[in-house]
Image (cartoon, rainbow, N blue to C red):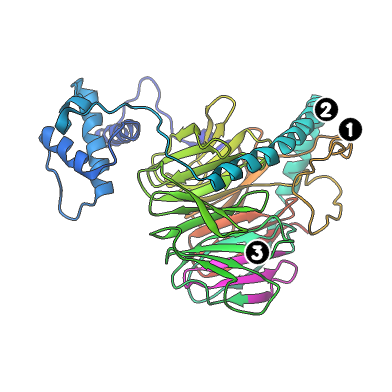
Amino acid sequence: MSLLKDLPTVSANQSYTSDQSALLASLDLKRRAARVAAPTDDAKVRHMLRNLGEPITLFGEGPAERRDRLKLVLARKEEEGSDFDMDAEEEGGDDEEQEEFYTPGSEELLSARRKMAEYSLPRAKARLRIESHDAKIPLPTHINQRKALRKVLVQTAAMGAQLTGDRPTGIARFSPDGRRFATGDWGGCVKVWRTGDMECESAKYGGHRDRVGGLAWNPDQTSGVELATGGGDGEIALWSTNNDKPEPLHLLKDVHTHRVNRVAFHSSGQYLCSASADTTWSLIDLPTLKPLLHQPGHSRAVYALSPHPDGSLLATGGQDAIGRAWDLRTGRTIMVLDGHVGDVLGLDWAEDGYRVLSAGGDGSVKVWDLRAVRCVATIPAHKGLASDVRWCRGGDVTAPSKPKPADSDAMDVSQDAEDELPADRPSGRSTWFATSGYDASVNLWSADDWTLVKSLKGHDGKVMSCDVSPGGEHILSSGWERVVRLWGRD
């Protein structure tokens, strides 16, 4: 049953209480304030507040909080019908054009953009072949598959748990083949575990001096760099699991000036993306270990990022409650994900290539459609903060399992990719996903009608992250109680 049916409703002959009306008015004001365009230059923010008759600063207020206060003031002015010409009120009479601007890029960045374009085109073609195959399957077959999927997902239960260290486990991620997973805790320790028996395979202590926020496996496991982590110390560590050394292979110290919140590999394995509290995200060339791009675009810390499965796009989200979809081949923003009231804390692209999920501090998960350029669904996912969201990748969990080579690519771009799919059943891609939240739960959702299929209980506190293994056989979650939990089906 949909969660929306459980929400209280107000009929035509009922009225809200004064407290409820005030709360609704406050939420509406915050939504409108999030859409207000305000300068990011703190000097201009102070000047505008002075012209509006507001205090230019409050006790303990920083530049980000001051800008948020300005946006609330402007939203109230808009509600009252007052006109305020921001350009006319600025000192010096400068007429700033509200349009896209570009900065010079290096030849290395231009070469990388060309390589990513050449890499993404055959993968997009293969993805469309699979979509074409699914479109030819009769609707009753799709319905039967989704019913079977629900029966499989409701059987998910706890399989094991392990204490990871002395500090909360901030993040956990499966390896590309699903046989291992890695964890990062707030003490700066990174550990690699075997999925089968949940035993620690190796521990890495020499990389970070502060909490590990970002962790990602390289999809190209044949390269020397298998794992990347980002820390609260502002550094990015690149690891190999084939040695017993506790130190990383490389430590990148000059990419960001503040905490690194998330890291993610480009699907080619040749580039690494990082999101930071310095309000930028970066693109790093792994063969040379050289940052190619420091991209602004958020007014506050960038917390989430997700590369597109084709390798053509990148989604970022931050504590400004805004997400953005970037075209890595051109550098342009192609879509703004504007709708969350709180921070955007998790992002993940579907394998179909046109849907991206965002998890927010307001407890909701939003579904964004790249084709329609809008949010198509809002899911009340958790009672508290929604910390992470992850699609199931790798096909139909109801189909008989087939062994997959450890070094195989996540997407077959050969001409025979469609021929390998069964002619009588859909591919099963992008059919369900998992979310984690601060209400101590991990939830499994159907992508058909965005309804809850199964809620997994077992954590004693906040669930910091979640992940789904390739093929959907296992689910991983990390918690505030310093525990990582594995979920699956017998």
| Residue highlighted by disc 2 | 137
Circle on res. 424: 1
Q: Residue 225 carries which label?
A: 3
Evaluate if marks 2 and 1 touch, with contact meaning CB atoms under 8 Å apart.
yes
Per the image, label 1 sits on a secondary structure element best described as loop
Amino acid type of the residue that numbered disc 2 sits on in the rendered structure? Ile
Query: Mark 2, mark 3: which one is toward the viewer?
Result: 3
Residue 407 placement (x, y as % from top left) = 78, 57
Which residue is drawn at the image coordinates 24% and 24% (left, top)?
A: 79
Which residue is painted at 83% across and 40% down in the image? 414
- Residue 280 inside the magenta-drawn segment: no
Indicate left or right for 219 with 163 as reference.
right
In the rendered image, the vertical position of residue 226 relative to residue 314, given as above or below: below
By secondary structure, the bulk of the magenta-drawn segment is best described as: strand
Q: Residues within 10 Å of mark 2 (few under 14, many from 20)?
A: some
Which residues are the magenta region?
A: 180-202
